[in-house]
Amino acid sequence: MNPEAAPPAPPAPLDADIVCTGFGPAVAGFLLTLTRGLQQPEMAAVESRAIAGLPPQVVCYERADDISFGVSGVVTRARAIRASLPDLDPSAIPLAARVREEKLLYLLDPLGATRRPAWMRLADQVCRALSGVLGVEHEALALPWIPPFLHKGDGFIFSLGQFNQWVGQQVMMSGLAQVWPAAPVAAPLIEDERVAGVRLAADGSEVRAALTVVGDGPVGAVGRQLDEHFGMPAGHRRDEWAVGMKMVIDLPESCALEEGTVWHTIGYPEPEIFGFLYVHPGRIASAGIFVPSWMDSPVRTSYRYLQHFIQHPCLWRHLEGGRLRSWGAKSLLESGRRGEPCLAGDGYARIGECSGSTNVLTGSGVDEAWLTGTLLAESVLELLRKGEPFTRQNLERTYVARRRASWLEHESRVAEKARNGFQWGLLPGFLGMALAGLTGGRIAWPRRSGERRPKRLADYYAGRLSRAEIERAKARAEAEARPLHDLLMDLCGWPPVQYDGQLLVSHQDALLMGGKVQAPAEFPDHVIFRSPQLCRDCEAHLCVEICSGEAIRVSQEYPAGPPAFDREKCVHCGACLWNCPVSNIEFCAAPGGLHSAEN
């Protein structure tokens, strides 16, 4: 006789109704909209499924040691933010200002050291020859027209750290949501193809919830594990990235730049690197660069290029004599809509940059991320009011449908193919962006079948350095356990950076003065090299070169083997993860990193 089937086990009790991972602009927009909505009369009858008799229990876990740490400065049109906060007064938020002046600058090469293509070298010559006619000053040409898709003139300059802190205070003062910093989430709880909550990194404890809101950024552990488990939609890939690095600078008394000034730059320190300068209130400026994944260099770096960027004559005349106030770096997912994952499933929804919301044509991501959060909050309020569960069907009918009907969807489709040209080269890249932007996405540069990858050292430096020079530089870098890019840049004519102890400081001093990097002692290393053999076979350890905090270094004990990792220096930018050409790095959730609220 067959034994009777055992009855199914009862579901585990909930710890919360909604759990969020990460507190960036997307989750900030979600929580602000949600907590405001829960205070409306029509929501008075809605009770928690986790704790009877109370309103829905909402908790957010943020990896960084404060909700304002480790994020970035930004210029944004703030359409979605202003829709949520129509009476927004920038003077109420530290370092916030309205945009008053906006320029797009082409920076000439003042040193002759950059790897400019022939057409760009010709452009430099023409600019210098016709400088009086064109208005070229201090090795820079202010373009007479900013394409409408790049225009931010009606927007705001924010320190995202200060903005997050301001929003977070309003959320927590509502008493309807808890936000826990220094609480990284290690993994989602996936049971029967449903997300049932999260597992915390500190002690492995589980937090069960009816809905998990995933907004942990482009390299967040939860988002990446969901992609691995559920897969990406057909034709979608996350193969375009950038690392953004910036300095926050106390401007010298001689600086005449006004609050609200915004400069976008192209052309220097390398043709592929875009830059920016924003002026905040109180004689404070943010200056930074974006180093893209499609840059050919096998030893691409950020910090030294940033130092050369701020010393370009056009910027240095305003910045010389300034003082480093803060410093930071982060990865940016630049695949846009092509990198959009499954937005919703049973028990979970994706918002923010990890949901593919960044617009790669307009160079805008904060406002788009905020909008995804508000759209999800509106959907959650609707489902709570109707007493309907957070199933994939219900979330697609509400959240995904709202997103598809929004301006975010329209503009992301326009931008979807805007970066295709950069897979072919710099000029096709600029032409492709212009085609997509000026035709509303109807005409775009075709995409290469294969992904553009860094070249081999000999190929990248062909015509500039001999194989013998490269091999000697590699041997010296290994012997001195130092990154290779400094030696190769020296050989190519980049002058040494003359440290002044205030603004031009060593990378390690920037970690202490501007990054204030810390890491708790009780956590294990969060960057792990899976296969030592793959590291030994690597020609140039790109993870060492790109590391924003010099946390990944050539091992003194085994120079040709796996690099050494010092988590006390890691800023959690995640650049090592997408720069490894053979995906040999495991990047885990951990606290620590930058301890500055001004980045």
Image: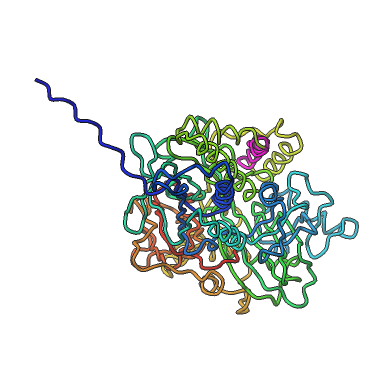
Q: Is residue 291 left or right of residue 208?
A: right
Quarter of the figure with residue 444: top right
Where residue 480 sits in the image (x, y, percent)?
Answer: 43, 70
The answer to whether residue 544 of the structure is visible from this angle is no
Does residue 46 show up magenta in the picture? no
Name the residue rendered at 80%, 57% in the picture.
Answer: 141
Q: Nearer the viewer, residue 372 or 123?
A: 372
Does residue 412 show up magenta in the picture? yes
Question: Is 528 placed above or below 480 here?
Answer: above
Quarter in which the N terminus is drawn: top left
Q: Nearer the viewer, residue 336 or 389?
A: 389
Q: Is residue 267 left or right of residue 583?
A: right
Question: Is 32 placed above or below 8 here?
Answer: below
Q: Is residue 204 left or right of residue 411?
A: left
Q: Nearer the viewer, residue 539 or 291?
A: 291
Question: Is 450 placed above or below 113 here?
Answer: above
Name the residue rendered at 64%, 41% in the picture.
Answer: 419
Where residue 534 sits in the image (x, y, percent)?
Answer: 36, 50
The answer to whether residue 410 of the structure is visible from this angle is yes
Quarter in which the C terminus is drawn: bottom right
Secondary structure mainly formed by the magenta segment = helix
**Count of numbered marks:** 0
Where residue 594 sits in the image (x, y, percent)?
Answer: 51, 65
- The part of the chain drawn in magenta is 407-424
